[in-house]
Image (cartoon, rainbow, N blue to C red):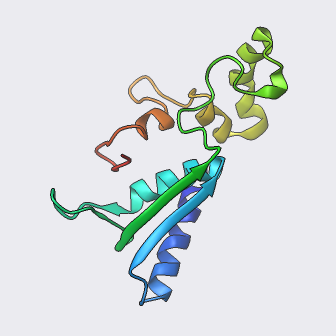
């Protein structure tokens, strides 16, 4: 996921347009995961009674379309595998070969013994960022 680039781009736009007060995100497919992560990193908690800020701006909308927020683990998640169980079993270990780190993140195989996969970390708030 190219979260760093998205983070930098949002920061640059906010800095270059001082009159901005509010921000919204609209993303599709993998872009939804990238936007979700970037928003979690850009989020600043104000207090317990007030909504936080994203890149110093008031958050209005966060919309994603066809975004696999919970990954793609499970039967019949990828139509091109035709629901064939054997193909689905080998898809997870093969995905990183074809699409790199993103493949392992989508199949929830990027975790380490002491740390869950990225998409699972993104389903709850964590020390490093607020994702909910």
**Quarter holding residue 101:** top right
Instruction: Note whether 110 is above or below 25 in the view shown.
Output: above
Identify which residue is drawn at 83% across, 19% down. Answer: 82
Q: Measured from the top left, where is residue 55 in percent x and y?
A: 39, 70
Is 74 displayed left or right of 50 in the figure?
right
User: Total of numbered circles in the picture?
Assistant: 0
Question: Is residue 31 placed above or below 121 in the rendered structure?
Answer: below
| Residue found 43% across the figure and 84% down from its top | 20
User: Most extreme residue toward the top, as rendered?
Assistant: 86
Residue 74 on image: x %, y %: 63, 19
**On the rendered structure, is 99 left or right of 66?**
right
- In the image, what residue occupies the spot 79% across and 36% down? 98
Residue at image x 28%, y 63%? 52
The residue lying toward the viewer, choosing from 39 and 82, is 82
Quick one: 27 or 128, which is closer to the camera?
27
State left or right for residue 43 relative to residue 97: left
Q: Position of residue 118 (x, y in %)?
A: 49, 37
Residue 125 location, x and y as percent? 32, 43
């Amino acid at each position: 996921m190219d979260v760093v680039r998205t983070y930098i781009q949002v920061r640059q736009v906010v800095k270059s347009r001082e009159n901005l007060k509010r921000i919204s995100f609209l993303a599709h497919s993998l872009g939804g995961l990238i936007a979700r992560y970037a928003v979690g990193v850009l989020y600043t908690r104000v207090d317990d009674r007030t909504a936080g800020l994203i890149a110093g701006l008031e958050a209005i909308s966060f919309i994603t379309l066809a975004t696999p927020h919970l990954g793609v683990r499970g039967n019949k998640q990828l139509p091109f595998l035709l629901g064939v169980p054997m193909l689905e079993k080998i898809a997870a270990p093969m995905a990183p070969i074809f699409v790199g780190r993103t493949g392992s993140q989508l199949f929830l195989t990027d975790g380490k013994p002491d740390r869950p996969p990225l998409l699972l970390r993104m389903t709850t708030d964590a020390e490093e960022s607020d994702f909910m």
